[in-house]
Amino acid sequence: MVLIEAIDFIYDAVRLDEKLLIREFNNLNVNYRLVNAGELTLNLPNGGDGGAAFIRTISQHKSQLVSQLYEALGGISINPAMSILIGNNKAVTLAILSRVGVPIPNTVITLSGDVAVKVLNAVGIPAIVKPVHGSWGRLVSLVGGVEDLQLLVRHRDSMGNPQYGAYLVQEYVRKPGRDIRVTVVGDRAVAAIYRYAVNDDWRTNTARGGKAEAVRVDPELEDISVRATKAIGAYYAGVDVVESDGGYKVLEVNTVPEFKNVQRVTGVNVARHIVELVLDLTKRG
Amino acid sequence: MPTKTSCQVCGADIEIPDDVLDGELVSCPSCGQKYQVVIQNGLIQLKLIKVEEEDWGE
């Protein structure tokens, strides 16, 4: 058992999401301290018991490293380091969801651009092609044919970043111009929104300026969202879901999730739910 | 009193509220350029951010 004296709220860039969380930490009189990841120093050997890190860094690399360091020193990380590593990797996330039977779109994962081109027809055209890492819809492409994908592979090769050598080739789910962001906290889907694409952009990320509307969460949506969150080992998450002819399908599980739009549109105090969960977890040790 | 500073890109005024936090993101109301607030020794500075060059996400 770890004795938690204060919770380290790890941040780098402060979004509205972090401000909402800080407000609830204050409202609930939580003993916490704001720790700028850029100024964090760990002196080794330190023989300490670790501490509790509430990871809210916007940099994915920093989230992964800091969460792992707190756990390596015997402390706890919220979310756990492994869930952050998995959540930051779309390929591994889908593999785990597949294993536990959470519905996902048909997807081929390959470490070769040439193979990605070869499997395209089997996946179906148009298809969605994504990198393994990345967020906010960056480098996610809608591919209309083999020539599109060949061009995309050449562009990716010219970027000179080995992580762009891995491809997710995914069936294009003909969603009704929207997808769903479900915020799961603990065992519950506390709130959800539809995210509508802007104009004719097929991407629906609100980071891309999409509009939003509250969702009445039905038992099936809650079930797959909570199962997806637990499958990757997260305590709370933002689960991206699409509606297909065959029912809901999970696209991603975000482990340092933004929720400001969910909170604004639904009126649910998501930040309060998250901070209560953090308190519960740190009391348990 | 909110602090006023000039956008490095378009020169428009950017108002920094009194309760701004270190690390907070602000945008120029005129051109949309993003900045990160850096507070050191009580001094507020704006660091220009190029979002596409960062590994930012959820």
Image (tube, helix red, strand yellow):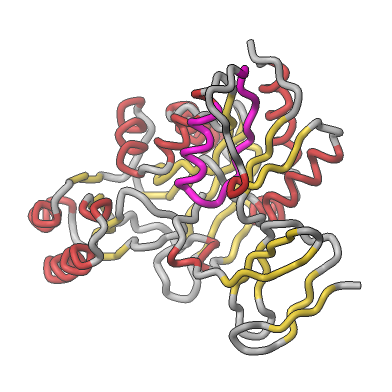
Pick the quarter of the image with the C terminus of chain A: top right
Residue A60: percent from left, percent from top = 47, 47
Rendering quarter of residue A27: top right
Q: In the picture shown, does residue B26 fall above or below A111?
A: below
Q: Is residue A158 left or right of residue A28?
A: left
Left or right, residue A99 beside residue A152: right
Above/below status of A233 relative to B22: above
Residue name at image x 64 percent, y 43 percent? A191
Image spot of residue A215 (x, y percent): 61, 49
Q: Is residue A56 magenta?
A: yes
Q: Residue A277, percent across and down?
A: 69, 29
Residue depicted at 62% across the width and 32% down the height: A53
Q: Nearer the viewer, residue A143 or A249?
A: A143
**Residue located farthest toward the bottom when viewing the structure as drawn:** B11
Is A225 on the left-hand or right-hand side of A122?
right
Closer to the camera, B22 or A42?
A: A42
The residue shown at (34%, 61%) is A140
Question: Residue A6 location in percent, x, y?
Answer: 75, 28
Residue A67 makes an appearance in the image: yes
Residue situated in front as seen by the camera: A134 or B40: B40
Q: Quadrant of residue A188?
A: top right
Read off the magenta span. Answer: A48-70
Vertical comparison of A52 with A259: above or below: above
Quadrant in which the N terminus of chain A appears: top right
